[in-house]
Amino acid sequence: MASNLNSHKRKSLAIYPGTFDPITMGHLDIIDRALNLFDRVIVAIAINPGKKPLFSLQERIEMIKKCFPDDYSRIEIDTVSGLLVQYAAEKNATAIIRGLRAVSDFDYEFQLALMNKKLEREVDTIFLMPGFRWIYISSSIIKDAARHGGDVCELVPAHVNQALLSVFRNN
Ligand code: COA
């Protein structure tokens, strides 16, 4: 404990991983909160083999980049192809950020966090709650609504809404 207090701390860095297919206002809310706690945040698009993304990796990167048009001094956008904790350790990150929206997220997130801890004990997982207005959204539910012509413009950035409209218009 004392060694932590005495150590000359590097600038704090957190990794915010996810599939981001696509990025939503809920994700942006979490990034905002993470930037209040850490000097820098890497938004890391990770491969989840259980998912078949609608948008290509490059499209997802571009969509996230467009959310931060001016300032890259505290935000980085990257991809992770291997083990997340290994990536976090290589980057000297202090923490992995995950959003917790509802109790239903907890089981999976708890398991993920414990497994990550087992694999790399130096990296902690920090759970952040998004604002109440984003508590019910997920990328899948937004895609599903958009696919059926539902208006999701308040739930995603404008350019993401445009991308959803053009994908589903052409389907
Ligand atoms: N606002 C909106 N949606 C949110 C949200 C928020 N604040 N927080 C979570 N979500 C949604 C996401 O949109 C996503 O929705 P979807 O399932 O409809 O796409 C869902 O919650 C959770 O997905 P996401 O946060 O994208 O994570 P994931 O479960 O797809 O991936 C990884 C989890 C990337 C962290 C995990 O697969 C990983 O670590 N991969 C790297 C390989 C590795 O290390 N594996 C070992 C792990 S022990």
Image (spheres, grey):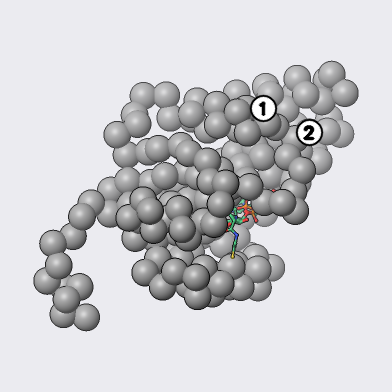
Q: Residue at left 68%, top 24%?
A: 163
Please give the count of numbered marks on the rendered protein: 2
Q: Find numbered disc 1 in the image and state the secondary structure of the residue it sits on.
A: helix
Q: Which residue is mark 1?
A: 161
Instruction: Give the spatial CA distance, label 1 vs label 2.
Output: 9 Å
Is the N terminus in the top left, top right, bottom left or bottom right quadrant? bottom left
Quarter-wise, where is residue 122 in the image? bottom left
Q: Earlier in the sequence, mark 1 or mark 2?
A: 2
Disc 2: CA contacts within 10 A as few (<14), some (14-19) or many (>=20) = some
Question: Which mark identifies residue 1?
Answer: none
Q: Find numbered disc 2 in the image and state the secondary structure of the residue it sits on.
A: helix
Residue type indicated by callout 1? Asn
**In this rendering, does residue 110 appear at all?**
yes
- Side of 104 relative to 98 (left or right): right
- Residue 36: x and y, percent? 33, 51
Disc 1: CA contacts within 10 A as few (<14), some (14-19) or many (>=20) = many
Q: Residue at left 55%, top 26%?
A: 62
- Residue situated in front as seen by the camera: 87 or 68: 87
Q: Eyeballing the image, is 45 above or below 67?
A: below
Q: Residue furthest bottom?
A: 1
- Residue 115: x and y, percent? 56, 72
Residue type indicated by callout 2? Ala
**In this rendering, does residue 128 appear at all?**
no
- Residue 85: x and y, percent? 47, 60
Q: Eyeballing the image, is 46 above or below 1?
A: above
Q: Which residue is mark 2?
A: 146
- Residue 154: x and y, percent? 63, 35
- Tag 1 and tag 2, C-beta contact below 8 Å: yes
